[in-house]
Amino acid sequence: METVVNYLVVLAIFVLLTLPSFIGHARERRIDRQLRQAERPAGAPAPTDLRTVPGSASRSRADWELAGGAAARNAE
């Protein structure tokens, strides 16, 4: 039982030391989101939060065909 208490004490100290960092990171992300929203024109639609594989969203159909992508062949 003493071992469990020791592990819990170490875990509590770790949480106390890392919590300010995580709170600061969350605050920075919120400020960045607010700045991006303020820079957008008033009538512009909000960008989607969907994540894509890097580079896949910017490829055109011709790029896929040149690369021999199966998605371009299946899209026809």
Image: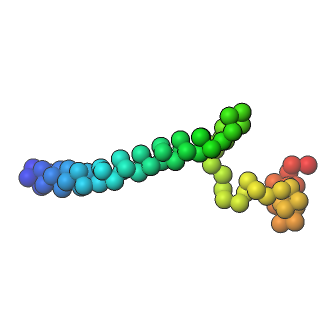
Quarter where residue 68 is shown: bottom right
- The answer to whether 17 is drawn above or below residue 33 in the figure is below
- The answer to whether 55 is drawn above or below residue 34 in the figure is below
| Front residue of 28 and 73 | 28
Instruction: Describe residue 13's horizontal placement relative to residue 76 as left or right.
Output: left
| Front residue of 27 and 22 | 27
The reply to whether residue 70 is in sight is no
Quarter where residue 42 is shown: top right
Quarter where residue 65 is shown: bottom right
In this figure, what is the number of numbered marks?
A: 0
The reply to whether residue 16 is in sight is yes
Which residue is painted at 79% across and 58% down in the image? 59
Which residue is painted at 29% across and 54% down in the image? 18
Instruction: Describe residue 6's horizontal placement relative to residue 15 as left or right.
Output: left
Q: At which x and y percent is residue 10?
A: 18, 56
Which residue is painted at 30% across and 50% down in the image? 20
Q: Furthest-top residue in view? A: 43
Q: Furthest-left residue in view? A: 2
Q: At which x and y percent is residue 54?
A: 66, 59
Q: At which x and y percent is residue 50?
A: 64, 44
Instruction: Describe residue 39's horizontal placement relative to residue 4 as left or right.
Output: right
Q: Furthest-bottom residue in view? A: 67
Q: At which x and y percent is residue 5?
A: 12, 50
| Front residue of 33 and 35 | 35
